[in-house]
Image (cartoon, rainbow, N blue to C red):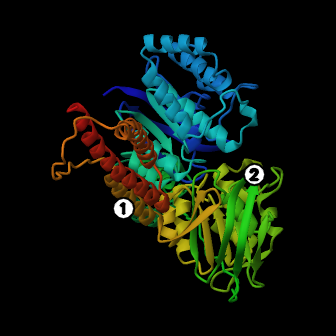
Amino acid sequence: MSTYISAENLGHSFNDTWLFRQLTFGINRGRRVALVGVNGAGKSTLLKLLAGKFNPIEGKVVRSKELKLGYLEQDPAFPKGATISDYIFQSDNEQQQLIRKYEELLEDDPDNYKAIEKVTEEISNLDAWEYEHNIKTILGRLDIHHLEQKIETLSGGQKKRLALAQLLIADPEIYVLDEPTNHLDIDTIEWLESLLTEGNKTILLVTHDRYFLDNVCNEIIEIDRGKINNYSGSYLYYLEKKEEREATEVAQFAKNSNLLRKELDWMRRQPQARGTKSKARIDAFYDLEEKTKDGGPKEKVQLTMKAARQGNKIIEIDHLTKGFNGKTLIENFSYVFKKGDRIGLAGKNGTGKSTFLNIITGSLNPDTGKIDKGETTVMGYFHQGGMVFKESDRVIDIVKDVAEYITMADGSTISASNLLTQFLFPPAKQFGMVAKLSGGEKKRLQLMHILMKNPNFLILDEPTNDLDIDTLNVLEEFLINYPGVLVLVTHDRYLLDKLTDQLFILEGNGVIKIYNGNYSSYRLEAEEARSEAKKASKVTIQPIIAAPAPKKSKLGFREQKELANIEKEIAQAEKEIKTLTAELNSGITNHQELTSLAAKISGLNEALNIKTLRWLELTELNETA
């Protein structure tokens, strides 16, 4: 099995702190590997080193000759002044350049039939129509349109999707992906899973999405305290084996610590003259000291914050409507929040999830309707854009600006410094600048900043972005026992399933449907509805045997006219059935829309059966004339 990339004794540091040292491993062809580890362990740095974005301080990265590598970074950079088309289509790829010309003609000059015909012929000669279809599918699924639009005018999420599209179109020999599911809705994530698992692709990725990790990867590499641990199997298998390994390490650490205390006592009691001591025993002491230096149980984030008392009236939404630029996002929606509500917001990008959250938090006014908030309701809003911390601020000062002492779930109070320690910010980081924190550490600081205010109505908008899986597991445990109201927006299907029992599904055009159940239940029902609708959509013309009618020598004028019209009606009905069937199979999950389409198709099939039988009857009569 050929090795695409190998790391040999790799070491790298930032801000005088080593992330890892002496890492040695390889990525072979056909392997689909997930890289996991806590925030700040060096996952993104390791991906950049493997992708050749910069050189390691120690060791080297070896890539196979002329390796075609595709790298998706968390915050991709783009050429200044470039358009979407400039970035998507590679200048040295003849097929891509023809497809680019074809798409631009259709968008900018659709009446230029001669030019379109010419480029169409060239695409046919290169047998590139399937390639064109694949490109169009990728761009469509990632919601990328208007190829002449400047990249600098796109939002952060659009830029990440554009970078992903370019990589998928290039179809490299190895995919190196840093958080590929960020800024994707759930339908698109499921499509991406299917695409990445087709064929024998080689993949190395970092992701916080546990369902995505399990569905795409079959091997896990963990960076833990600067070392590499390999696991073959699912994420659940990794957790089981990791727990066994850590239990063994804790036991060994306890044993080594006890032995070290005895050896330390022996070292102190011996004369200073080195020659009088056992050199082998001294060397063993220093070796044991090194082993215990970074050992011991791993610290984990501790979330035990108290929620403020909640009254009977929480938040009441009354006939809410909101739109932008003539597009309605929310129309006439009402809901009364109850104690213990655990609600997930689901819907494609652009259907208004963030708008809905901004309205109920009061940062955006509705067009019509009102939001009535109870006096005891204390809101905490974890925004996907993050909080704006000054890079020059000290971490501890950000916390002390909220409170010097914080009340915990058991009623006890702790200092700001102790709270930061519980959130895995040791003293060195507490008194350091925000600029030195990783993206995940900044998100963890934001989460702590919000929970310090003891909210009883918690809104989490994409909390999984940039958080490591270990922190997500602790957050999940905290939220399972959280006594307040929870509103969750996330593309992480695992988190939706574990934490919510009701969904607000934003279906587009202002419609918000309330579904009682979690996301997996909703998807299962949608699949069953689609399956039933497909059965109803099949055209089945059953011949009807009727009593023979008296034969006519020829058709009358009225019957001739009926025959001519019925042929047109049959053709039109078949066309409508084909169009509606394609719409039915396009991935719609709305139950009402699926049922409506199935009913229309069923009605058209019945009418088609009747018209076809009448056409046969008239044709037979005409032939006997």
What's the distance in space between the residues labelled 2 and 1, CA to CA?
A: 58 Å
How crowded is the residue under tag 2: few (<14 C-alpha within 10 Å), some, or many (20+)?
Answer: few
**Residue at the spot x=68%, y=68% of the render?**
332
Compared to 497, does 99 lie above or below? above
* Horizontal side of residue 475 vs 307, given as left or right: left
Q: Amino acid at mark 2?
A: Gly
Check the picture and name the quadrant holding the C terminus. top left
Secondary structure of the residue carrying numbered label 2 = loop
* Horizontal side of residue 462 vs 131, given as left or right: right
Secondary structure of the residue carrying numbered label 1 = helix
Upstream in the sequence, badge 2 or badge 1? 1
Residue 215 pos. (x, y %)? 39, 49
**Residue at the spot x=35%, y=50% of the render?**
605
Compared to 444, does 225 lie above or below? above
Q: Which mark is residue 11?
A: none
How crowded is the residue under tag 1: few (<14 C-alpha within 10 Å), some, or many (20+)?
Answer: few
* Residue on which the image places disc 1: 244
Q: Which mark is residue 326?
A: 2
Q: Amino acid at mark 1?
A: Glu
